[in-house]
Amino acid sequence: MPITTCIFDAYGTLFDVTSAARAAAEEPWPEQFAAHWQKIAAEWRTKQLEYTWLRAAAGQHSDFWQVTEDGLDWALEAMSLSVPGLRERLLQLYWELDAFPEVPEMLSALKSAGLSTAILSNGSPAMLEGAVSSAGISHMLDEVLSVEQVGVFKPHPSVYDLVEERFGCARGDVLFVSSNGWDVCAAAGYGFRTAWVNRAGAPVDRLWGQPDVMLDDLTQIPQVANEQVAQ
């Protein structure tokens, strides 16, 4: 079956989740933040994801903005950072995350090849709208799908169901792309063809599915999609 639809995770895949803390580190905040922003960004992201999994497992859903705030609060407290205005500034910058540099050209190539493109994300609709608009890639996406439509975070199967419901395609017609190893493995187990953007060089997660392709960044996604189309 040929690939007809390319679906992308948003945070960490199209958008650099460390860019909010990195941008703030270039501003005149206390040295304790500037010296440790990378650790704060990493712990913020880790807690953000952990809270999605825990909420999904417990049936205690809240939107992604809530877990983003909660994860940041944990990370700042872990570093004993209580700086007036810093929390608010980091959250403001999260609405304007940088897209990875290869994103516009990659999406443009997919659209030129006649493929459908979309985001499927844990993000709330408002958060995703802000990120997509800030990156200037709205016109390169056919849809932005949020877990808020089903009220549970990835990797619940009902989230991946949203792709078939929107595009009317078979699972094997979809190339699902994520930087999150657990997300790719779950999507592969669901029946999507998958590409893992393994920017950190991490081991493959031991889960119920495995990625079809592993890449360093998004540059080769059009080539991967075209190879799948030709099969």
Image: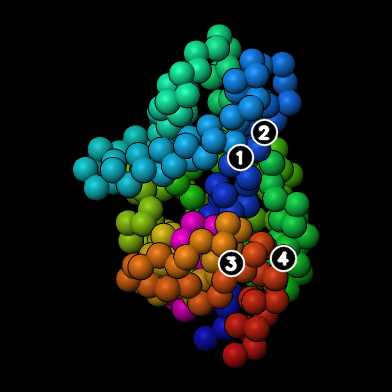
Of helix, strand and loop, which one carries label 1? loop
- Distance from the alpha carbon under mark 4 to that under mark 2: 23 Å
- Distance from the alpha carbon under mark 3 to that under mark 1: 24 Å
- What residue is pinned by disc 4? 219
Mark toward the viewer: 4 or 2? 2
Q: Residue placed at 40% from the left, 65% from the top?
A: 205
User: Which region shows up in magenta?
Assistant: 169-181
Asked if the residue at tag 2 contacts the one at tag 1, i.e. Cβ–Cβ closer than 8 Å, the answer is yes
Mark toward the viewer: 3 or 1? 1
**Residue 163: image tag:** none
Mark toward the viewer: 3 or 2? 2
- What residue is pinned by disc 3? 6
Of helix, strand and loop, which one carries label 2? helix
- What residue is pinned by disc 1? 18
Which amino acid is tagged 1?
Answer: Thr
Which amino acid is tagged 4?
Answer: Thr
| Any part of residue 149 in sight | no
Q: Position of residue 33 (x, y in %)?
A: 60, 23
Which amino acid is tagged 3?
Answer: Cys
- What residue is pinned by disc 2? 22
Sooner in the amino-acid sequence: mark 1 or mark 4 = 1
Sooner in the amino-acid sequence: mark 3 or mark 1 = 3
Q: Residue placed at 78% from the left, 60% from the top?
A: 105
